[in-house]
Image: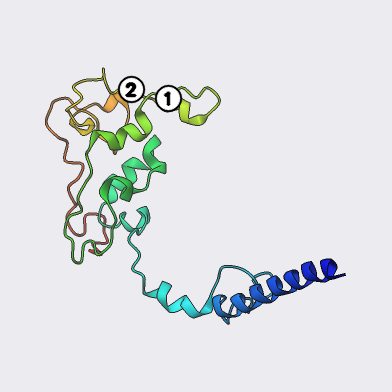
Amino acid sequence: MSHVWRPLFVALALVAGILIFRSFYVPKDFGIGEAGYMYGWHNPNNEKFWKDIKVKYKGSTYCKDCHGKNFTSIRNTPHAIIPCENCHGPGTDHPEKIAKLTIDINRLLCLRCHAVLKYPNSDRGKIRGIDPATHQDPNVECVTCHDPHNPNLGALKKSQQRFPVYEREPMGAQGKGSGR
């Protein structure tokens, strides 16, 4: 008869071990909350921790007061879906502590979308792409010829001179001059 009781005792010991482990490991406020959120990932004990985290990315609408010309011009292009901070970097402390953001003009940034990928059943395959090995000089950055704020072939830059698309507009140029 011991062969019947032994597995039962092992199972009971396993359940007891799990309950004891749970009492030490699971936070006391787990499962406390409104119906529907009772066992979610929200933990009231660490709310302060998350409130103290500084947000690095502010979103494209943050940029429009000071950079209205570029913000408006890019809204009418295929690049409208790309947040400003993808190329210009996180807007944390800009312009209060960081006057000018570091702009990534690396060719690889553009190639994330513009390298030719053959996906016939995907919208990704519809994006105009290039073969980076044969398109111009691989050591030349895309912004030398292409204006990312007006990304169409008709707007190719007329010379090797960089178009001043990255310069900040003067305070009040958009009528607000908030200087965020």
Image vertical order of residue 135 relative to residue 165, above or below: above
Q: Residue sitting at 26 percent across and 52 percent down?
A: 67
Q: Identify the mark at residue 13; answer none if there is no mark.
A: none
* Residue 150 visible, this orientation: no
Closest to the observer, 147 or 27:
27
Q: Could you classify mark 1 by the number of other residues whose Cα lies within 10 Å: few (under 14), some (14-19), or many (20 or more)?
A: some
From the top left corner, tell me how far across and down residue 57 is, in percent.
34, 58
From the top left corner, tell me how far across and down residue 135 is, in percent.
26, 20
Residue at numbered disc 2: 130
Q: Residue sitting at 26 percent across and 48 percent down?
A: 88
Q: Residue sitting at 29 percent across and 55 percent down?
A: 90
Question: Residue 176: which quarter of the image?
Answer: bottom left
Amino acid type, mark 2: Ile
From the viewer's perspective, is 3 left or right of 157?
right
Q: Could you classify mark 2 by the number of other residues whose Cα lies within 10 Å: few (under 14), some (14-19), or many (20 or more)?
A: some
- Sequence-wise first label, 2 or 1: 1
Image vertical order of residue 60 relative to residue 5, above or below: above
From the viewer's perspective, is 65 left or right of 157?
right
Image quarter hosting the N terminus: bottom right
From the viewer's perspective, is 116 left or right of 153?
right
Residue at numbered disc 1: 117
Q: Residue sitting at 24 percent across and 64 percent down?
A: 93
Count of labels shown? 2
Image vertical order of residue 53 relative to residue 142, above or below: below
Do the numbered discs 2 and 1 sit on residues whose CB atoms are within 8 Å?
no
Image vertical order of residue 134 relative to residue 1, above or below: above
Closest to the observer, 116 or 10:
10
Q: In the image as oriented, which residue stretches furthest toward the left?
A: 161
From the top left corner, tell me how far across and down residue 10 is, in percent.
73, 70
Amino acid type, mark 1: Leu
From the top left corner, tell me how far across and down residue 160 is, in percent.
12, 27
